[in-house]
Image (spheres, rainbow, N blue to C red):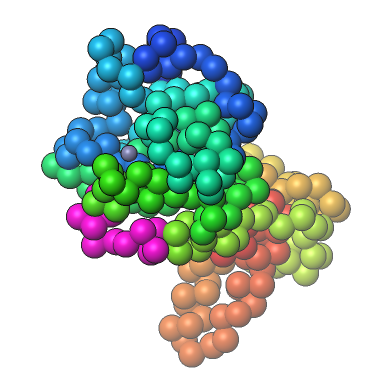
Amino acid sequence: MNANKYPIERRYIDKRPNVRPGIRLVTGSPAFFVAHDTGNPGASADNHWTYFQRQTDRTASAQVFIDDRKILEIIPAGTGADPAEQAYHVIRNIKADNELYGYDANHAALGIELCYGGSINFDQAYKRFVWYLALCCSKWGKTPSTHIASHRQLDPARKRDCDQALAAGGVTLKQLIADITAELAVPVPIAPAPAKLPADVRDHVIVSYIQSAWLASFQAGEREEADHYSRLADNVRAAAAGEKLPKSNAQEIIFNWLSPAWHKAKANGLDPSRYNVMANALRTSAGIPLA
Ligand SMILES: [Zn+2]
C-alpha cells in the first residue's frame, strides 16, 4: 500500500486519568482495531480534540479522529515515534472483545473514530478512514476481516457505530472491510533503479534540441539562458556516463521537447512511440516513476 497517501497529525491531549491515562497498551503494539463513529454529526476531528482536552467529568476517549480534512491522533497510536497508549472507547464489562481477541479493547486496541454528518464530506472522510485502517493493518501485520471490529459488533446491545455513520454515506461494514483490503493491495509507487541514459537518447536530445536552443539564446545575447543549456547538455552527457540526471532536467526536456514532438508525430499520422521510449529513459535516469 501507499503509506504516504495522507499526512497524520499528532496533537495529543494532556494526560489525565479519565481520558488519557498515559498507560501503554498491554500488548505493546495494537492487537486489533475498533472502528467507531463519533455519534456527533458535524463535529470535526479538531472539535473532538477540544472536547476531550476539556473533558473532566466523564471517562471516555479514543486515539484517532478522522474527518474530511485530516487524520488526527489525540492520544499516541503507535503509527509514529510515540508508542501506543490506552484510551477508553469500549465499555469494560462486555465479553465480545475478550472472546474474540483475548483482551479488553481498551487495553489492547486502537479506537479509530469516523467524523461524519453536517458539512463533513463523507467520501473524503471515508477515504481517510479506509486508508488509516489499512495503514494500521499493514504496519502491524493484521487482517482487516479478522482484526477490525465495529463498536457495534463488540457491544450490540448499546452501540450502533460505526455502522450508522457508514450507512449515512451508503456504505456497509462489509464494504468498509473490502475497501480496506483493496487499499492494502494498492501497489507502492516505486521509482525505477537509476540506469545509464542510452547513447542514442543522449545524442538525439543534445543534437535535436539542446544545441539549437543554446545557439538561439547565444545569438540573442541571452547569456544566462545559453549557460543553462550548456549545463543541461553536460548533465545529459554525464547521465549517459552513469550519473543521475537531475529530475528538473528530465522534466524540462520531456515538457519542452519530447511531449510536443510526440503530439506533432501523432497529428501527422506518424508513430510517436519513440518519444515515449526516450521520455522513459530520461525518467529512469532521473529516478522518476514511469508514467
Ligand atoms: Zn464507538
Residue 6: % across, % down: 45, 42
Pick the front one: 56 or 239:
56
Q: Main secondary structure of the magenta part?
A: helix
* Residue 21 appears in the figure: yes
Is 184 on the left or on the right of 242, as rendered? Answer: left
Is 67 on the left or on the right of 128, as rendered? Answer: left
Circle count = 0
Residue 114: % across, % down: 32, 42
**In the picture, which quadrant includes the C terminus?**
bottom right
Pick the front one: 216 or 194:
194
Q: With respect to residue 114, does 87 lie above or below?
A: above
Residue 254 among those drawn in magenta: no
Q: Which region shows up in magenta?
A: 165-176
**What residue is rendered at 58% in x and 55% in y?**
143
Residue 161: % across, % down: 29, 46
Pick the front one: 243 or 125:
125
**What residue is rendered at 28% in x and 17% in y?**
58
Q: With respect to residue 83, does 250 lie above or below?
A: below
* Residue 71 appears in the figure: no
Q: Residue furthest right?
A: 241
Q: Residue furthest bottom?
A: 269
Residue 100: % across, % down: 53, 48
**What residue is rendered at 66% in x and 72% in y?**
277
